Image: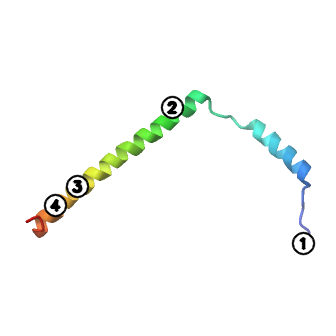
Amino acid sequence: MASKTTNPFTFLQQVRSETAKVTWPSRRETVISTIMVVAMAFLAAIFFFLADQILSWGVELILGLGQ
């Protein structure tokens, strides 16, 4: 089987051509998305912290380890 190879110059031209087709997000969209990701990560951290505390309290109550 013969492998088809592309020379580096042609490859770079193809990459540049494909990159030009990409719809890049605006600065505003990027900032809003970043803020949303950070906010959701913070909310998830709070949720899991509270869930862990409640489960820990429940286990201590059931097993009597909190004495």
Measured along the vertical axis of the image, is residue 31 above or below residue 65?
above
Q: Residue at horizontal 87%, vertical 44%?
A: 13
Assess disc 3: are there few (<14), some (14-19) or many (≥20) residues with their C-alpha within 10 Å of its C-alpha. few
In the picture of the structure, the residue carrying the numbered disc 1 is 1
Q: Mark 4 belongs to which amino acid?
A: Gly
Q: Mark 1 belongs to which amino acid?
A: Met
Q: Is residue 17 left or right of residue 40?
A: right
In the picture of the structure, the residue carrying the numbered disc 4 is 58
Kindly state the secondary structure of the residue where label 2 is placed: helix
Q: Is residue 6 left or right of residue 50?
A: right
Q: Nearer the N terminus, badge 1 or badge 2?
A: 1
Q: Residue at horizontal 51%, vertical 31%?
A: 32
The disc at residue 53 is 3
The disc at residue 37 is none
In the picture of the structure, the residue carrying the numbered disc 2 is 32
Work out how far the residue at label 1 is from the one at label 3, CA to CA, in angstroms.
62 Å
Q: Are marks 1 and 2 in contact (CB under 8 Å)?
A: no
Work out which residue is located at the far left of the displayed protein and give it: 67
Q: Mark 2 belongs to which amino acid?
A: Ile
Work out how far the residue at label 1 is from the one at label 2, CA to CA, in angstroms.
50 Å
Q: Are marks 1 and 4 in contact (CB under 8 Å)?
A: no
Rendering coords of residue 59 (x, y %): 17, 64
Q: Residue at horizontal 41%, vertical 42%?
A: 40
Q: Nearer the N terminus, badge 1 or badge 4?
A: 1
